[in-house]
Image (cartoon, rainbow, N blue to C red):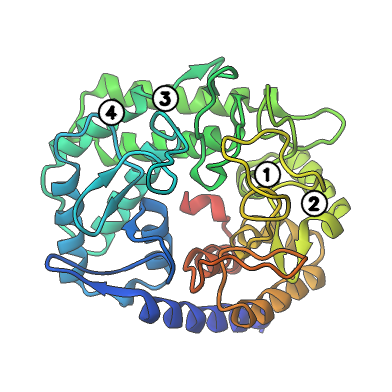
Amino acid sequence: MKNGILEECYSTLKEYLKTCIEKTKIQTEKVLAFKPSDGLYDSIWPDDFAFPTMVSPESLSKEDYQRIADFISDSCQGLVVVPDRVRFDGMPIMSPGPFGEPISYRMPAHLPSAWVRLLIHLEKQGVTLKNRDFWAKLIERSFENVDFKDGLVYIDPEKPYVGFAYHDCIAISGYDFFSSIVTMKGLRRAATFFQNDLPLATREKWLSMSSKIKSNLTRLLDPKKKAFLAGSDSCRQVNIWANGLYYGDANCEEKQGIRDYLIKHMNQIIHQGCTRQIAESRGWEKQLLEMPINSYMNGGYWPTGTGYIFQAIYETDHELGKQLLRDLITALPKYEYPEWISPNGIVSNERYFHMAIAIPMLAIRSVIDGGSLFDYF
């Protein structure tokens, strides 16, 4: 079978995810759901709920999905913009970060797109979304809360905030690559999803904004490295994960540059099948919240990150891509399905972390089906 090894890896990861979901299921008065991990993460995040249930929709029943949709709709009533997450007690939390230490003073830029993706996914599970008019206007206000310059998502260099939430302690500023590419897809999705809920002028504006993002991404393309920088002001470093994700939408020349950069830096970005966000040993050049080197987002090695780069690696060298998956599959149960690991033996306190498995699964499925991970964003 042409994709036999990939199918085997996918099936193994599917069993891993099933283990994690069973470990983290939570029953409240209103919903049966699951936490993103067995640690301190105690909410419904749009990404952390959507992606695992994309690859394992049978984890919950149609009735469970309906109750979750009703729950988040009720929780978001009255908000000006979408929240970072919704706690299981129904409280919307607006900023990423631990209690008393919010990392961002305003809505992370990627969130409108993430919530649109979740709403679409819930409808695919048979949910009837109540208050569509409310959601349409909330998403519209949320997109309006995102700053743009020269077509790209823009973060104030003198007062940076979170762009893409999986970089939530990193002070990326100027043009933001990851937030821009996710918003590019989110605007397109929203224009279609809300076609009966918002004026044509609004939806045409979103499509125009999406096109402008696409045509201006080369502002972040480093001419020497042939890969895209995380930010144009601070953190002018190649964003490994974002380049891997955008690979699925890049042109041939851009794809070659991304492949070349990843292969050149494999020894710096990969550890036991897990992947860092940047290649530099010093970590990110600027942080919103200081993290030790080789931990969390400042150089920690994430199973999630391997999903982002898998297609680019596999299309460059099939055997190297397969070995990357084998190493990941070995490491995941060894460290109890961690959020991240470090080369000095430190492991994240967040174990049974669903996204550590879901994003690699989606990446594998994309290759098998002839698509890309970016299709799911």
Residue drawn at 77 percent across, 66 percent down = 344
Q: Check contact, mark 2 vs mark 4: CB within 8 A.
A: no
Q: Earlier in the sequence, mark 4 or mark 1?
A: 4
Q: Amino acid at mark 2?
A: Leu
Left or right, 303 with respect to 75, comes to: right
Tell me the SS state at disc 3: loop
Q: Earlier in the sequence, mark 4 or mark 3?
A: 4
Q: Amino acid at mark 4?
A: Glu
Q: Check contact, mark 2 vs mark 3: CB within 8 A.
A: no
Left or right, 246 with respect to 180, comes to: right
Q: Earlier in the sequence, mark 1 or mark 3?
A: 3
Question: Residue 232: percent from the left, percent from the top?
Answer: 68, 23
Q: CA distance from mark 1 to mark 3?
A: 22 Å
Q: Check contact, mark 4 vs mark 3: CB within 8 A.
A: no
For label 3, the residue is: 146
Q: CA distance from mark 2 to mark 3?
A: 30 Å
Q: Amino acid at mark 3?
A: Val
For label 2, the residue is: 262
Q: Check contact, mark 1 vs mark 2: CB within 8 A.
A: yes
Left or right, 165 with respect to 292, comes to: left
Residue 243's disc is 1
Other residues around mark 2 within 10 Å, as few (<14) / some (14–19) / many (≥20): many
For label 4, the residue is: 140
Other residues around mark 1 within 10 Å, as few (<14) / some (14–19) / many (≥20): many
In-front residue for pair 137/336: 336
- Can residue 152 be seen from the camera position used here? no
In-front residue for pair 342/78: 342
